Image (cartoon, rainbow, N blue to C red):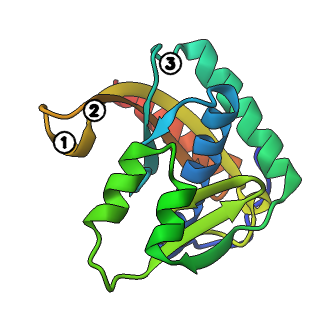
Amino acid sequence: MTPKSSTSEFPNADYYDRLRHSVAHIMADAVLQKYPDAKLGIGPTIENGFYYDFQLDNPFTPDDLIEIEKSMQKTIDLDLAFESRAVARNEALGILRDQPFKKEIVNDLDKDEEITFYKHGKFDDLCEGPHLESTGQVPSFKLLSTAGAYWRGNEQRPMLQRIYGTAWESSERLTAYLQNLEEAQ
């Protein structure tokens, strides 16, 4: 979407991890705004991008991805702070009362493991981090595709919908990456 200028000439792996994980959260927020009953899976970074898994009744369409990108850009433009906090297990389960996949993750954690959430605006998600300081620090991103993915990679578990995306430190780097993807196809 609308890129902003880079804050660093030579980003490192930590920067890309924070950037892409932040954008995954912004995307999950946008999906929940459009589909409030969606169930969240996980949203990690991967090489050159990120994904997030969702359980929905209807499949995502290309038009949905365009709408989600527009909503994401609005959140970026608001420059909302990413706020981290540790919570007790019971509080975490209460926050996640309508998110069965996230509750399963909490229940699988060691009893002594710290449980953390990251919040921007009204969106609050179980997460270890790291993130950028605010949504406004996202320079450029693009949602790329959708796919099916079994919860926790187990074909006996529910099939979720995965949205893949990428994020870069500048519009030039994003454009170059997208051109390389196109040429590879």
Seen from this angle, which residue lies furthest bottom? Answer: 112
Q: Amino acid at mark 1?
A: Gly
Seen from this angle, which residue lies furthest right? Answer: 78
Residue pictured at 57% horizontal, 29% vertical: 37
Q: Which mark is residue 149?
A: 2
Residue pictured at 44% horizontal, 72% vertical: 89
SS type, badge 1: helix
Residue 8, compared with residue 142, is above or below; it is below
User: For this rendering, which residue is in front, 161 or 56?
Assistant: 56
Pointers 3 and 1 in contact (CB under 8 A)? no
Q: Amino acid at mark 2?
A: Ala
Q: Which mark is residue 153?
A: 1
Q: Is 144 displayed left or right of 27 in the figure?
A: left
Residue position marked by numbered label 3 in the rendering: 60
Picture quarter with the C terminus: top left
Q: Amino acid at mark 3?
A: Phe
* Quadrant in the picture for residue 134: bottom right
Q: CA distance from mark 3 to mark 2?
A: 13 Å
SS type, badge 2: strand
Q: Position of residue 145 (x, y in %)?
A: 45, 27
Residue pictured at 76% horizontal, 46% vertical: 3
Residue pictured at 47% horizontal, 69% vertical: 90
Q: Residues within 10 Å of mark 3 (few under 14, many from 20)?
A: some
